[in-house]
Image (cartoon, rainbow, N blue to C red):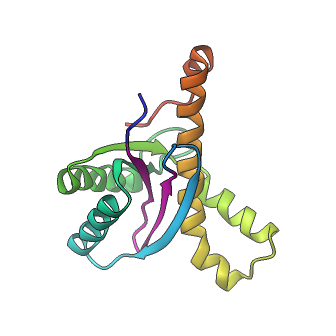
Amino acid sequence: MKPRGRVLALDFGERRMGLAVSDALGLTAQGLPTLERRNRRADLEALCRLVREHNVDLVLVGNPVHLSGRAGAQAEAAQAFAEQVRRYTGREVRLWDERLTTAEAQRVLRQSGVSSAKRAAAVDRLAAVLLLQSYLDCQNLAATSPEAGAAAPPETK
């Protein structure tokens, strides 16, 4: 079931968080300025502001599982942060498999001729856009084709 409001995606990192928000129809992902992490409380307050400003119903947190699908320390940190976001914002929060989004973002930026200095600043934002767009594509595919929805990648818990 598609949320009524927008979806906010977080590419969770220790120093920065890439951010993206869906359009009002839930079809496309647009990048937001990257959040430079300060401390947990300030990060959660900033996310709360974004949730209100963009009428967000669902927060999607990238789940950095290993290629094998097993959760490591980073996935556990993302899961714990997702729970804090849920409690702090009062919104539904889902984890979404983010395997290779950062690598794909770096590849896209490199192929686009973006300098390495600018690439470092843009990679988190683009990773969040790729994460959110994969979620939106799966949701829209499932909504238009019940058979295709069965083949959509599952959310990671």
- Residue extending furthest toward the bottom: 117
Tally the marks: 0
Q: Visible in this render: residue 96?
A: yes
* Residue 114 in magenta stretch: no
Reply above or below: 91 against 33: above
Locate residue 80, reporting x and y percent.
Answer: 27, 52
Locate residue 138, reporting x and y percent.
Answer: 57, 33
- x 57%, y 60%: residue: 127
- x 61%, y 14%: residue: 147
Locate residue 81, reporting x and y percent.
Answer: 29, 56
* Residue 7 in magenta stretch: yes
Is residue 71 toward the left or the right of residue 113 in the image? left
Locate residue 26, reporting x and y percent.
Answer: 51, 43
- The residue lying toward the viewer, choosing from 108 and 129, is 129
- x 24%, y 69%: residue: 45
* Residue segment shown in magenta: 5-23
Reply above or below: 3 against 30: above
- Tell me the quadrant of the picture where the N terminus can be found: top left
Is residue 96 toward the left or the right of residue 73 in the image? right
Please identify the dominant SS of the magenta region. Answer: strand
Q: Quadrant of residue 16?
A: bottom left
- x 59%, y 49%: residue: 28
Q: Quadrant of residue 68?
A: top right
- The residue lying toward the viewer, choosing from 118 and 26, is 26
